[in-house]
Image (cartoon, rainbow, N blue to C red):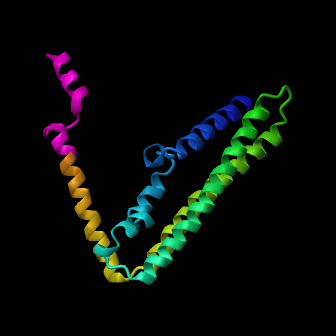
Amino acid sequence: LLAAAILMVVSFTVDLQAQGRGRKGMMKHSRYGLRMAEKNMFPAHMLLKHKDEIGLSEKQVTKITQMKDLFTEASIRAKADAKIKQMKIQSYMKTDKIDRKKLEKMIRDAAALKTDMQIDRMNHMLDIKGVLTAEQLKKIEAFKKERREQRRSARKDRRGGRKGQSGQRGQMRQNRNL
């Protein structure tokens, strides 16, 4: 049981450390379900960056900016709280006598905070989506589709039309196999 608790702490630590690295490392696998849900959403910073193409009014820009700023502030606090909980768990694990119930509570509290952060993110994105009109949502979908095609095309160009063989490493693999 102690080994399982240590494993949970280590995996939670890795998740929390990955959160500070942007989308590439941010809970890559545990966020898969949320990423699929976010597929129908658009981050606030992207809406603001493309406000003219989307046709946002000044009132919408102001509202989205306020929502983004409030969410960012709350997110920074939540991440700091999660890091503190992580540090307390690690510190407690170094003590000579470990109370399993106390450790379990600490881990559950940290996991609940992580869940709350994910829920807050989804609520934030849904709230932003609620500010947009149906016409703006259609423009966003068209924009996202265009960007997906551009990324696919760029990936295909980098590979030179070969699936699974990308860049210098792909060339090295091909050369080894000759």
Pick the residue in front: 115 or 74.
Answer: 74
- Image quadrant containing the N terminus: top right
What residue sits 65% from the left and 37% below the top? 8
What residue sits 21% from the left and 55% below the top? 150
What residue sits 35% from the left and 82% below the top? 134
Q: Main secondary structure of the magenta part?
A: helix
What residue sits 30% from the left and 70% below the top? 141
User: From the viewer's perspective, is 64 left or right of 151?
Assistant: right
Where residue 112 appears, x then y in whole percent? Answer: 67, 54
Residue 58, quarter of picture:
bottom left
Where residue 12 appears, x then y in whole percent? Answer: 62, 41
In this rendering, the answer to whether 19 lies above or below 4 is below
User: From the viewer's perspective, is 70 left or right of 170?
Assistant: right
Residue 118, quarter of picture:
bottom right
Q: Is residue 159 magenta?
A: yes
In this rendering, the answer to whether 10 lies above or below 54 is above
Pick the residue in front: 91 or 2.
Answer: 91
What residue span does the magenta drawing correspond to? Answer: 155-178
In this rendering, the answer to whether 45 lies above or below 83 is below
